[in-house]
Image: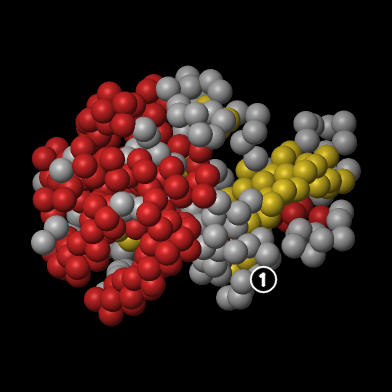
């Protein structure tokens, strides 16, 4: 099929599809790699399984490591998601996974998924935001997923790991070094007021972490990279729902981290002021409909504002791992304006 050893053999693909009930027998005319491209952290290939004249071709989506990526993530993080989490998650929110493999090193993981190109599409060309209706659908999908894992008994017990104080202290020590490099890089393009804000956050971080996170309540599995381009919207909304993709960064955390990342980090103030509260209301309504109790909108709003404050760290970290400034510089400007608009400095010492 191909000389690339990252691609499973034709015989192996046939067996996977037969086990999944997608393929009824061994009669396959061939398997072709239709396209291959590199993303920031992975290599993705679209495969076509030709069934001769008997049936339309099957298309699959294969995701493997990007060997030369500047960003280091735990080996097989997304493979672990599809192995441990996807089978216990609500139906119709994730692509169907045919195989998830992680042999414990950075070279040995892949996920083989259904290719949704014919039925779904990315909402817009980055960085153009989606429509409000599309936003509501995407946010509703995240709410259903968060609700399914809300204070789930498996969290920290076979599914994910709770961050303890020692791990948090190591993270903050690393961030301190990253922020020092960020300050040096920007020079007088970083005002003393903004520098002071981040330094205040760093001084308050341990207290904020202990107050919100250590009780291990009102936590769920978050996406970790929940911008709207990591969601596929159905071409025909009457026949399908949103699919959430690219789960490399999942973790146990407060659900509003995904919302702050999606909205406050990526939206300019005018759009955020128009649609922010409406989107959060839709999210809360869907969360309650998914079975979450004892978490009113005021609690959500408080968590959201705190998550917006934590998102100040995101562009600093993006700069540290050498993402382009066309990504992190705009993120920093937008998130600082959101912190001001939402009065997030009230959380700080």
Q: Position of residue 78 (x, y in %)?
A: 53, 59
Residue 226 relative to residue 15: left or right? left
Quadrant of residue 340 in the image?
A: top left
Q: Position of residue 81 (x, y in %)?
A: 48, 59
The quadrant of the rendering that contains the C terminus is bottom left
The quadrant of the rendering that contains the N terminus is bottom right
Residue 202 relative to residue 178: left or right? left
Residue in front for this viewpoint, 340 or 112: 340
Residue 98 relative to residue 218: left or right? right
- Whether residue 82 is visible, yes or no, is no
- Whether residue 247 is visible, yes or no, is yes
Residue in front for this viewpoint, 67 or 83: 67
Total count of labels: 1
- Is residue 56 placed above or below 43 in the rendered structure? above
Q: Residues within 10 Å of mark 1 (few under 14, many from 20)?
A: some
Outermost residue to the bottom: 166
Q: Residue at x 31, y 64 (%)?
A: 155
Identify the residue under disc 1: 107
Q: Position of residue 294 (x, y in %)?
A: 11, 46
Q: Position of residue 243 (x, y in %)?
A: 49, 38
Which element type, helix, strand or loop, lies under badge 1?
A: loop
């Amino acid at each position: 099929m191909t000389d690339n050893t990252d691609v499973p053999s034709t015989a192996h693909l046939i067996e996977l599809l037969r086990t999944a009930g997608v393929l009824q027998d061994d009669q396959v005319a061939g398997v072709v790699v239709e396209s291959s491209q590199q993303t920031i952290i992975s290599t993705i290939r679209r495969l076509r399984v030709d069934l001769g004249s008997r049936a339309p071709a099957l298309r699959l989506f294969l995701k493997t490591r990007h060997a030369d990526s500047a960003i280091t993530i735990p080996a097989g993080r997304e493979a672990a998601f599809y192995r441990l989490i996807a089978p216990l998650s609500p139906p119709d929110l994730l692509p169907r996974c045919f195989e998830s493999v992680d042999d414990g090193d950075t070279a040995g993981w892949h996920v083989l998924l259904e290719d949704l190109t014919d039925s779904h599409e990315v909402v817009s060309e980055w960085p153009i935001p989606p429509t409000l209706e599309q936003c509501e659908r995407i946010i509703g999908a995240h709410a259903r997923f968060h609700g399914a894992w809300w204070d789930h008994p498996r969290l920290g017990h076979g599914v994910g790991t709770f961050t303890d104080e020692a791990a948090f202290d190591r993270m903050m020590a690393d961030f301190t070094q990253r922020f020092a490099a960020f300050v040096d890089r920007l020079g007088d393009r970083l005002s003393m007021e903004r520098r002071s804000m981040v330094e205040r956050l760093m001084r308050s971080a341990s207290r904020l972490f202990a107050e919100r996170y250590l009780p291990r309540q009102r936590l769920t599995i978050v996406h970790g990279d929940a911008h709207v381009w990591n969601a596929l919207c159905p071409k025909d909304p009457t026949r399908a729902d949103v699919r959430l993709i690219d789960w490399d960064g999942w973790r146990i955390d407060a659900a509003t981290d995904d919302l702050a990342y999606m909205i406050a980090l990526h939206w300019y103030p005018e759009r955020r002021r128009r649609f922010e509260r409406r989107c959060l209301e839709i999210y809360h309504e869907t969360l309650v409909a998914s079975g979450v109790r004892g978490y009113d909108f005021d609690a959500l709003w408080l968590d959201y504002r705190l998550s917006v404050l934590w998102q100040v760290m995101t562009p600093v970290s993006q700069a540290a791992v050498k993402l382009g400034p066309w990504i992190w510089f705009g993120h920093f400007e937008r998130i600082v304006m959101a912190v001001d608009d939402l009065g997030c400095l009230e959380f700080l010492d």
